[in-house]
Amino acid sequence: MRRGDVYWVEFDPVQGSEADKSRPAVVVGNDAANRSAEIGGRGVVTVVPITSNIRRVLPFQVLIPARTCGLRADSKAQAEQVRAVSPQRIRDRIGRLPPRELKLLDDALRLHLGL
């Protein structure tokens, strides 16, 4: 599991306006932490949920064309929904974000987190 990989992630149960259900998400944590969580089964993996609702793409969201990483439809990564999840929530690998979209996602995370 590497930074930039896109996986199906089971987000339920959630509360309030959190991204819910099983949906794609981009791994954004560093590779060493991801490897430790994946191999040891402990720790967490930091991900950004993806939605196919692209009516509006806000400055802290990134449009992802479906053809670029194996998604079924054009979608957007929601940096405002960034969260740490247990490795047990992570399912099948879908693909990988291209470098351009990963850089845009890094920028969106910086904007959202005020870094």
Image: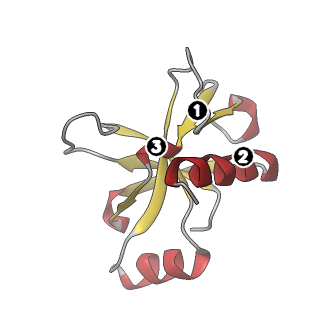
Figure label count: 3
Callout 1: SS:
strand
The residue carrying pointer 3 sits among few (fewer than 14), some (14 to 19) or many (20 or more) residues within 10 Å by Cα, namely some
Q: Residue at x 62, y 67 (%)?
A: 2
Residue, disc 2: 104
Quarter of the picture containing the C terminus is bottom right
In front: label 1 or label 2: 2
Q: Quadrant of residue 43?
A: bottom left
Q: Are marks 3 and 1 in contact (CB under 8 Å)?
A: no
Q: Position of residue 44 (x, y in %)?
A: 37, 71
Q: In the image, what residue type sits under mark 2?
A: Leu
In front: label 3 or label 1: 3
Badge 1 or badge 2: first in the primary sequence = 1
**Spatial CA span between label 3 and label 1:** 11 Å
Quarter of the picture containing the N terminus is bottom right
Q: Say if 107 sits above or below 16 in the image.
A: below
Residue, disc 3: 80
Q: Is residue 96 visible?
A: no
Callout 2: SS:
helix
- Is 66 on the left or on the right of 44, as rendered? right
Q: In the image, what residue type sits under mark 1?
A: Lys
Q: Say if 82 sits above or below 38 in the image.
A: above
Q: Nearer the viewer, residue 22 or 29?
A: 29
Q: Are marks 2 and 3 in contact (CB under 8 Å)?
A: no
Q: In the image, what residue type sits under mark 3?
A: Glu
Task: Specify the label residue 76 is tagged with.
Answer: 1
